[in-house]
Amino acid sequence: ERYEVRYFGAGPALLPTEVLEDAAKALLNYDDTGLGLTELSHRSENAWDILKKTKADLAAFLDVPSNYEILFMQGGGSGQFSAVVYNLVGAWVERKKDELIEVLFGGKSEEEVDQDELVAELKKSIRSEMKLDYLITGSWSLKAYQEAIRLLGQDHVNVVTDSRAINTSGKFGKIADESDWKLSKNPAFVYYCDNETVDGVEFPKFPAALAPNKDGAGPIVVADMSSNILSRQVPIENFGVVFFGAQKNLGPAGITVVLINRDLLPPVTPQPSPALMRALGLPIAPVVLSYETADKNNSLYNTLPIFDVYIAGQVLKRLLLTFPNRVADQEALAKQKADIIYAALEEHPDIYRIIPDKSVRSRMNICFRVTMTKDIKDSEMEFLELAKDRGLIGLKGHRSVGGIRASNYNSVPLEGAVELAEFLRFFAKK
Ligand code: PMP
């Protein structure tokens, strides 16, 4: 048995009670097989069906175009910080190789070209041209950027914008005007984090500077949507890769979803051979982080936690039943809830200081300070204690930044947002 609580934790997040009740039964005996879900082979027909249905429902709910592949991987959002580098550097090399063969060795096939010469030319191009572009707008994009440097070295990683440089406090909280971004000419990809979970900063919409031109040409854009996926419509066709850990808006921790444009996979873009990558001094993707391998094996190269996929599938099934206009309806509700909470905070500027700039306030992670006394920490401790007395929990900010963070993921019902807003008013008056 569980009793309902108002939980605003930043992730893992609440899952619908009915889904957990069904999952509890399936954990003992799935579909009358006599086996529980965690005991089923990931290669069984049942597992295969769960995977297929979950993919189809995710594509339906989010409107994933048919030229995109849905991959289920492991290693979390953090694993993807590395995976995008390995895989998309490989894709960049492959494109550059084709271009060089065409331009310098006109007409020859790859096999006819002198391999040492090709490697030498590729090395030159890599040294002078290969850049990965990162927008640093909060703690998670900063981590992804640091991982790119760890794998490739600083020379290949370009900072498009760093929000810390435009805030007088040197902290995150604003996104620089697009006209001030410094994009590279032909980057392997441009990376950003759509919603910064720790700092409460969310891109209001897809950045115009990254949009394809009228001929459809534009940079390969990668986005981390770990904390706002399924909460608003996404122009997926503008992205090369979108990834997210399941544990905030989709299901339990343990699976990571990758939406990838098929142009970045074979046969359009095969990964260069490990021998070539080695010769070029570039890192080779561990096989479990290879998109090509995940795709070729229907996400079942190695043991996938099918139980996690099952729960994600049940969450999606419920979402599809609840929202006739799918993610558009969820978007309206997410906005309504966020507006209710921000409105209560704004009524008491003497007590609450919202951290991010209004232009980039997250609908998902609402970050603020409680400033009624000089000692902010004392004020916040009191705030958290009284909130807990009212059954409102999980409100403590990330340990790296402090403060209060109300995470407003999909599983927080409208009543939860209303109760939090009531508490914010009650506390301010008190
Ligand atoms: N990106 C974002 C935006 C996140 O919020 C998180 C986790 N909170 C991560 C990446 C890292 O995810 P994981 O813990 O699954 O590696």
Image (cartoon, helix red, strand yellow):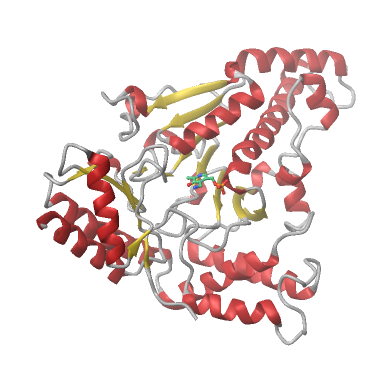
Picture quarter with the C terminus: bottom left
Residue 273 point in image, percent of width and height:
82, 32
Q: Is residue 57 left or right of residue 110?
A: left
Query: Which of these two is toward me, 423 or 120?
Result: 423
Query: Which of these two is toward me, 61 or 45?
Result: 45
Residue 124 point in image, percent of width and height:
70, 12
Q: Write the residue at 78% across / 74% down.
A: 45
For residue 365, above or below residue 39:
above
Q: Is residue 338 left or right of residue 311?
A: left
Q: Quadrant of residue 199?
A: top left
Q: Write the residue at 49% across / 66% down.
A: 61
Query: Which of these two is toward me, 247 or 84?
Result: 247
Q: Write the residue at 27% across / 60% down.
A: 387
> Can I make out residue 169 in this image?
yes
Q: Write the residue at 28% across / 26% down.
A: 167
Residue 235 point in image, percent of width and height:
45, 50
> Can I make out residue 212 in this image?
no
Q: Is residue 265 left or right of residue 234?
A: right
